[in-house]
Amino acid sequence: MPHLTQIKVRGYHLDIYQHVNNARYLEFLEEARWSYLEDAGDVAFFAEMHLAWVIVNININYRQAATNGQTLNIATQFSKIGGKSAVIHQVISIAGSDVVVADADITFVCLDQRTGKAVAIDGELLARLSTHLTD
């Protein structure tokens, strides 16, 4: 089951057209990923391993405008784990409806903070990330 995060749209999220500015969706998605990692206990795990998540690709589809005062639900879940990267799928929808505002696939690598290089996703790291995969 996906992890859910709620964000209320505020006036400072809006652009001149009075809907959420496209760049703000990236911030919403990042907030939801951090919330997911915190709730799963992964922030401490990655800190102990001296690993950082580094985004290498974001594909986002803007589907419908979100406006001031709306509450957005952001569903976050892993969709793929590869040898050196993994993909998180996120869907932003208007709370209380089936209206999808945006969806995105975010590809990241795990960077060894001591060497500055991406590490293979295997062993303990693979086991930890695999717990997040959903059917």
Image (spheres, rainbow, N blue to C red):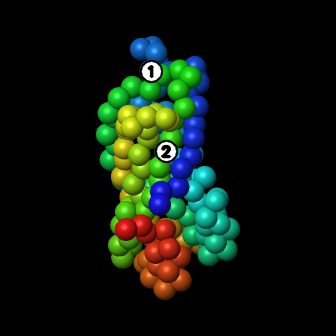
The relative height of residue 66 versus residue 131 in the rendered view (above or below) is above
Foreground residue, 82 or 41?
A: 41
Q: Could one spot residue 85 in this view of the protein?
A: no
Residue pictured at 43% horizontal, 78% vertical: 120
Tell me if 83 is positioned left or right of 20 in this view. Answer: left
Task: Tell me residue 104's x, y (percent).
Answer: 37, 47
Could you say which is closer to the camera, residue 6 or residue 89? 6
Q: How many tags in the picture?
A: 2
Task: Locate residue 114: give its quadrant.
Answer: bottom right
x, y (%) of residue 24?
49, 33
Q: Earlier in the sequence, mark 1 or mark 2?
A: 1
Q: Amino acid at mark 2?
A: Ile
Q: Residue at x 49, y 85 (%)?
A: 123
Circles 1 and 2: CB distance less than 8 Å?
no
Q: Residue at x 35, y 73 (%)?
A: 82
Q: Element at badge 2?
A: strand
Instruction: Name the quadrant of the C terminus.
Output: bottom left
Q: Give the residue at the far bottom of this rendering.
A: 123
Residue type at mark 1 is His
Residue at disc 1, secondary structure: loop
Q: Which mark is residue 96?
A: none
Q: Residue at x 53, y 83 (%)?
A: 124
Q: Of tags 1 and 2, which is closer to the observer? A: 2
The residue labelled by disc 1 is 19
Give the labeled residue for mark 2: 74
> Which residue is at the front of the view, 23 or 17?
17
Image side of residue 55 versus residue 64, left or right:
right
Q: Is residue 82 visible from the viewing direction of this image?
A: yes
Residue 15, image x, y percentages: 47, 19
